[in-house]
Image (cartoon, rainbow, N blue to C red):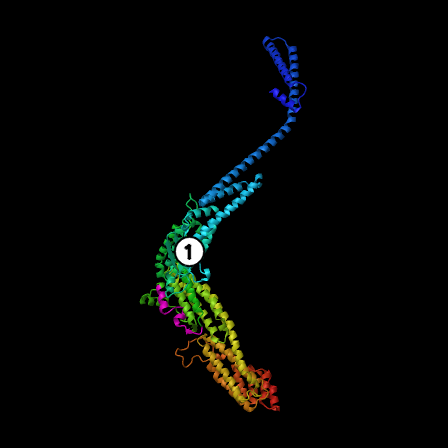
Amino acid sequence: MSSLVTEALASAGKLAKDDWNVKISKLAARAFDTKRELSECIEEEFCNFSSLRESCEDTNAKLTEIRDEAHRLEKSLETMVQDQIPDTTKKFDQLAKEHSKTVELVQVLEKLNFAYFYFRNHELDVKHKNLLQASIKLEKVKQCIESANGMKMVESQIYKALKVEYHLCKEQILYTLDEAWRDSVLWELPGDNGDMTRSPKLTISFSQNQSLSSQDVIYALYVCGTLTYKVEKLAKHCIEHMIKPCILNPGCDVNVKQNSGTASVMLNNCDGAEDENREEKEVCNHDEIFTNVLKFLQFLYDNLLKLKLEPEKDAVVMEIFSSFIFEETIKLIVDQCLPKTVPQTKEGLDNYHQVTECVNKFDASLRKIKFLPPSVEKSDLISYVADIHIHFASRRSIDILAEARRLMKLDLHDTEEINDNERKAELTGDAYNKVREAVNIKKEPEFIERGKELFWKPEHPLSDNTLCLPRCRVSKSAKSILKLAYTTLCEATKSSDQTALKLVFTTEQIFELYMAVVPIYHKKLFLKIVPHITAVFHNDCWFLSHHLLTMGHQFTNKLKSKLDGKNLLFVQLVPRLRSIGEICCDELHLAQLRRQRDQIMESLAPLRNFNSGMDAKLSKYSAAERTVKQTLHQLQHLRKVWKGVFPSNILQRSLALLTDTAISEIVSSICSMEDISSDDSIQLKMICHLMQDQVPLVFKQQDEDDEQPAEAEDSATPWQREVKKWQRLNEIIFVLDSSMTKIVDRWAEGKGPLSMAFTVAEMKSLIRALFQNTERRANAISKIRL
């Protein structure tokens, strides 16, 4: 070993002149001699008990010298070895790099060998039309090329040539597969060759090319990664030209033809033409739709979509196909087909199990051909028929609200007077019988009723009209809406809990819809010159709100268990409904009153030109009389229109307001005249007498042709109190027919009746116009003061 070290050191030129091997041998011999001497000393010291101190000291000195010599030798050796380590490391690194290059070269050569092997096998497979193996070999070539990414040898010319060759082979096999697919899956669509009447047709004929089987084409397409794209394109055509027409047009017919090696399916009668029984089909067309859709999907499954994707796995093409269109197909059926199966009556709901069975069979058939993915445990079809009570309630709600909206859009001109039962928030006729049957109202024996009457009869009973709605007229549409609400609640008492809850909410929505639709829809009619429409709407609002006060209480006991213990009340709608009626009445009725007032003032405006000639064709007396008669006719017309619509107090107040306007305009016109002759005074007095005679007829409570007696109202206000200007009319007649002395006496220094009807200026103006300018007139005028 020492000679080897010596040779290594000598070859490097680092060996010293001294022979280290000799030195080490001598040092070892000296150490052995020292050891022997030390052993003898110890033996003599402890065994022979001789005094050997001097000998031990000599031995110790020798031992120290030997140890120092060994340390120097070790240090010198370490120094020489450390100087040689860097050169040795560099050589080792160089050898490692060369080894790595060699390994990489070997790997590249192996990949080249594999690629060449796969290319050669690929060519043989293509030659023998084995497209599956050819595709697999080509994919392995791709893996070899991709695994070589990052290697330095990849940039060599041979690898570049391999990439080019791979792409050429890839394009060649894709073209072959695309041609095989295109020749085997053929579409004939409307618009091809300019023929828009052509029916959609799909033909599948993979076996026409004997060298390629359908399964091999599917395998090869899947390995190449283009099968998903082609199946997606096929799925889009199927949903657009086959499945959707089958669902949207119940009259479509799916015709399947099977020949040797060729299968085709055609969709006939898909133009959406209506036939005589179209309405009946819309009710029961679900079975036909399910049959057509399933027939088409079964055709695809039997001829194409049942083929496997890989030889050793169970996955089929249908799984890829369904992933693109199954959600849209199910959604189309749920949105377009199943809603038509929802019954409109409770009897139809009881027989809905037939539709449920049909849907379950259809769902099972779709799962059998793997159209529904296994991850979908419960399809939307099953969920829809399972929730039929909810859909039935929703449809009933839609139908009821549609009927309510139709009733709300009816004209408000057609009115009826409410009867006594309706004034008490009770129904009569068939509607009352239905409510009575629904809430189980049982009539008690007569003796019990008499006993209760005697026992509970108060000492001072209230009037029968205390809680009654005032007698008025309401529209027939309002009565129909109220009847619809009661009918809906009666239906809720016989329905399931979910349906009953929905119908109760629908009843509330009827009145919500009324408050939203009627004021907007009839707004133009309110603003037109139809004075009583606003009053009818006001009465309708109060009529409906009056019934809402007790409507909920009539059905609470019967529906309480179906409403989770909640009380059935509609009183929260009453303030809003009344407020809408009051707002319309206040705003629109006042606007109509202003319009009528303006018409009256326009009619009486010619009176201000009484002295200057009112009409060239008529005398001024005839013209003045005509204007007054026109005003009276307008008041009579308004009375006929408003009577029965408005309550008597509102009717009287409205007519009094317009009458005051007419009287005020007539009296003001007379007071503004500067000169009134005796003949003019007589004619003006006759005009005022005409007003005085005809105005009471305007406020007459009952016409001669009225069969029903007028409602007695103890608190009715005499119309004279409402017509504030009535005294002014009486006093102007007195002034026109009296002497100056009587006028002054009736003034009574500002304390007489005249002073309450006229101002000082008006009275002086009348005296100046009626009498000549004399000292007597001046004295009379001087007495007209307060």
Residue 697 vs residue 768: left or right?
left
Choose top left, top right, bottom left or bottom right for residue 478.
bottom left
Q: Is residue 577 visible?
A: no
Vertical comparison of 247 with 686: above or below: above
Is residue 61 inside the magenta stretch? no
Q: Which x, y percent locates residue 450?
A: 33, 68
Looking at the image, residue 738 lies above or below residue 334? below
Q: Is residue 421 visible?
A: yes
Which quadrant would the C terminus be assigned to in this image? bottom right
Secondary element under disc 1, as helix, strand or loop, is strand
Q: What stretch of residues is rendered in magenta?
A: 412-437
Q: Mark 1 is on which residue type?
A: Leu
- Quick check: 395 left or right of 164? left
Identify which residue, 184 or 55, lies in the foreground: 184
Q: Position of residue 112 (x, y in %)?
A: 53, 39
Q: Position of residue 679 (x, y in %)?
A: 54, 91
Is 39 left, or right, of 312 in this rendering? right
* Nearest to the observer: residue 700 or residue 302: 302
Residue 712, picture quadrant:
bottom left
Image quadrant where one finds the N terminus: top right
Instruction: Out of 410 and 572, give the one closest to the viewer.
Output: 410
Crowding around mark 1 (Cα neighbors within 10 Å: few <14, some 14 to 19, many 20+) is many
Asked whether 436 falls inside the magenta stretch, the response is yes
Residue, far right: 17
Q: Which residue is mark 1?
A: 202
Residue 200 position within the rendered picture, expressed as x and y whole percent measured from the top left: 42, 58
